[in-house]
Image (cartoon, grey):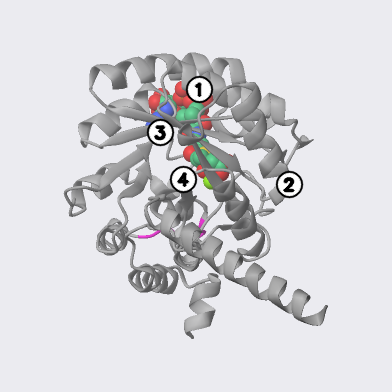
Amino acid sequence: MLMYFGTICIFRSIINSQIKFYRTLSNQSKIIKIVEVAPRDGLQNEKKILSSADKIKFIDKLSDTGLKYIEATSFVSAEWIPQLADGFEVMRGINRHEGIIYSALVPNMTGFKKALDCQVDEIAVFGAVSETFCKKNINCSIEDSFKRFTPVIEAAKKANLRVRGYVSCIIGCPYEGPIHPRKSASIISRMLTMGCYEVSLGDTIGSGSPDSWRTLINMCYQEFGIPLSKMAVHCHDISGGAAAIDNIEAALEMGITTIDSSTGGIGGCPYADGIARGNVPTEDVIHKLNQLHLNTGVDVDKVLDAGNFICKILNIQNISRYASLKH
Ligand code: HMG
Ligand code: MG
């Protein structure tokens, strides 16, 4: 009897190691796209306003890490976001590498024209599921935000620029509380129908859990027919990265292949009232993906170097767990 159970255990462990091996092999062929948002989503919410030269140095460092997509700045009102008032100088000053997309966030045609003037590779428009957040972030209702996106997306199409979309508060809002996944899915779907090639699902206040992420992704995919390849996850965090990494892992398991992250975990959302201090650090995302044998082509130690560089200038700590691991 004992021998029988022993044989079963050995057999099981062989099967498990085979499964692990094949999972590793299939993971290795999967490429995960990282959208680096520190120069925009990071710097927009740091108290210290950096010189254009420092921002350019930071982006140039990020360009040497293997990252293929860098959101370099935004073209929004300087009264609302003074930290990024020099978008033009930054965009024109960086050393642009072949094969890297340098994008910028634009809220309206004024921003679009500026972005076009400095030859961005892509633009992103941004809306929200919560009316209150939308009003506080871009000073209009959700319906009016779509009216603003329409000419921007049309003009981008004419200029041969792809448009990414962001939707904030997909799980919770700092003002309205929990958000129903169907409401989020309908806004995400509308953005795609309008012409965004991909929509980033913003957990603006980091209130998501693996379960709420699974429910939302499932709702988008099953009920709204949104392909997984058209959704990206954008996680903010309240606990130094741990919860956001769990949420990202849940999204990866569901088949999501695009992740937004911020080197050094800098920034967050200026209208989330400090609830979600950090963006998920790129260092921790890459480290986790390496552990899962998922391919990014990004050198995590070079990212850490860029993270330490920017945190030193900002006079803050690099909150990534990878930074403390390496310390
Ligand atoms: P408004 O005051 O309603 O705009 O702001 P307006 O059309 O009435 O114009 C007022 C003045 O702003 C005018 O100047 C315009 O020219 C100027 P004046 O004639 O008085 O001298 N203006 C601009 N200037 C520069 N660039 C522009 C621009 N547009 C108008 N693009 C507006 C509306 C959308 C401009 C304002 O609310 C704004 O800039 N908001 C930006 C907010 C922002 O950047 N938030 C952070 C990014 S979103 C985010 O972080 C979330 C995300 O990461 C996902 C997640 O985590 O959830 C994406
Ligand atoms: Mg954000």
Which label was assigned to residue 257?
A: 4
Quote the CA–CA distance across marks 1 and 4.
19 Å
Marks 3,4: beta carbons within 8 A: no
> Which amino acid type corresponds to the residue marked 3 in the rendered image?
Ala
Residue carrying label 1: 191
- Mark before the other along the chain sequence, 2 or 1: 1
Q: Residues within 10 Å of mark 4 (few under 14, many from 20)?
A: many
Q: Main secondary structure of the magenta part?
A: loop
Q: What stretch is highlighted in magenta?
A: 46-50
Q: Residue at x 21, y 31 (%)?
A: 117
Report if residue 246 is visible in the image: yes
Give the foreground label among 3 and 4.
Answer: 4
The CA span between labels 3 and 4 is 18 Å
- The residue that label 3 is drawn on is 124
Q: In this view, does 203 lie to the left or right of 190?
A: right
Residue 167 horizontal/vertical position (percent): 56, 33
Q: Name the residue under label 2.
A: 211
Residue type, numbered disc 1: Met
